[in-house]
Image (tube, rainbow, N blue to C red):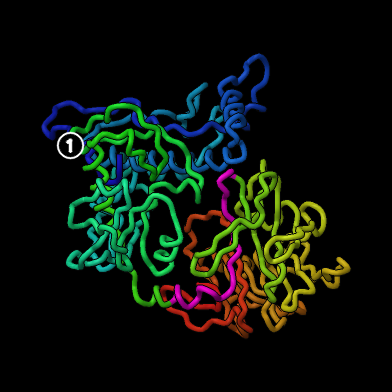
Amino acid sequence: MGFGDGKYSGIPADLPKPVVAHEMGYFVTLPDLSQIELFKGRLRPYWLCQTRDLAASRGVANLYPEWMERSYRLQAVCLKTNIEAARRSRLGGYSVWLFQDYPNCAEGVVDMFFRPKALSAAEFRRFNAPTVLLLEAPRRSLRFGERASMMLLVSAVLEDGKARVENEWNVRAFPAQRPSGLPRRVKFDEPYRRYAPTPAAEGGDSRPSDGDLWVAGRADSAIVDFLEQGGRVLLMDPEPLFGVEKTNYRLYSVRTAYPLRGRPRICPGRIDTARFPQEPRQEMSTIIAAILAALPPTSQPDRELASEVRDKGWIVYGARSPKGDWDLFMMRPNGSGSRNLTNTPAWNEGLPRLSPDGKRLLYRRIPAAASFDNNRHGAQGELVLAGADASSPAAFGKEGECPWAFWSPYGSRIACLSPKGVTIVDISSKRTLATLDRKGFFQQLVWSPDGRWFAGVANDFGTGWSVARMDAAGGTPRGFLHGGHDRQVLPGEGDALLGDLRRPSAVKGWSSAPTCSSSTPSPWRCTSITPRRARCGCRS
């Protein structure tokens, strides 16, 4: 099932009777465990209790809410794609399976208590109503420079000849791939050399040139050096570096289209060659050839930038550890030297911010069983102050206090943003020095290096979300970036400031923002801005 596929195209045009698709769909989600508390009386939701207990026994209870939300979004995409494919076909009607979940099967558009999942009633009726707007397009993923041909269609059952309908689709464009005429080299480490697409593509023992591919087992110093200089690596055994989930995925032979003999258990990207017969060679060769075709070239400016910023400070960021919790990590600006700073399975840490002098770090932490919320993560849990390497962490205030904290230019104070206003706090005495009206600011404030301005995300300028600034003494704010959902505000030098401008319908998702330190006198100074990146000391 995919966009524009021929799933329902086999209906003859001259068929005298209408064809109806029965119980179309079957897109299952993970069940919402909060329903357990809603069951009253003698009915015990055993299937929900079993799922809860299974998640706890496998140590993924803290990950389950996020997995559930992602399964909801995937189901919504599948429902929309499938129904629109049916509406574009010669089908005379269809029955979608299923509207409401039932015991032991979460296939419904709503759960057992008629609560919507990823789709509201209005969103569902965009593509499942008497009259629906459809898109006819061969592809929606294009390369830069391609010409797209798309047609809008109307699937209509009109009683009075009039209807007001709306629908939406995403069309994505990507950089043009490397010209096929350029030579491409691949180095295969043993025992993966057998999967080379052709003998000519095999790089032997020589190192591949920048921009080509290295198929390796585990990462070593040579691999890291190759990556730092702009190369690409297909890591077949990432377990020592990255936690991967076990799977029962069985390789299929392209030649026979039947499962291979045996039931090998592998990890994504990991091949146990001792247990595989010769049949996977063709499929692995096809996969590697596809990777080669999709890789864009590594440009000279990219290599120059990676070399330029290699030793200029550090970036601290939040990411999921192999154990499943969120930890803080530190790496060089070119991605090298990454290491776990907190390594605390009992806590989730996020929203790190290094002090302007690069010697201290503030972040928020919540229990590992809790999840960071998309819009409230800056106010969740405790504020923690620590050394730049997360050493000697100490809670600064109680849970929920000092929300959206950020450093003053000299690091002796922090400012916090809450519905009550912007509060400036002295770190040594923990005394509140001033409270200013928040003037419509919502989250993610920063303090300019000269101490004169606050800048952040606001929603009080008649344009939806915007990036705005106000003087630190509580003056009138001024919005200067708007027209979308603006996030991730970074301070510049003087009047320079970077913001992330997104269209209003952009998908929102929480990620732990990185923070930088640098040995240069002015680590945030923007030296150049291009359509692809901004060079700001140690950030790119």
Residue 37 visible at all: yes
In the image, residue 47 above or below residue 305: above
Callout 1: few (<14), some (14-19), or many (20+) C-alpha neighbours within 10 Å? few
At mark 1, the secondary structure is loop
Which residue lies under the disc numbered 1?
Answer: 255
Question: In the image, 264: left or right of 60?
Answer: left
Quadrant housing residue 107: top left
Residue under the point 29% across and 43% down: 155
Residue under the point 29% across and 57% down: 187
Q: Which residues are magenta?
A: 305-324
Image spot of residue 1 (x, y percent): 30, 39
Image spot of residue 477 (x, y percent): 67, 76
Image spot of residue 223 (x, y percent): 41, 60
Residue under the point 58% across and 78% down: 497
Q: Is residue 309 magenta?
A: yes
Nearest to the observer: residue 32 or residue 132: 32
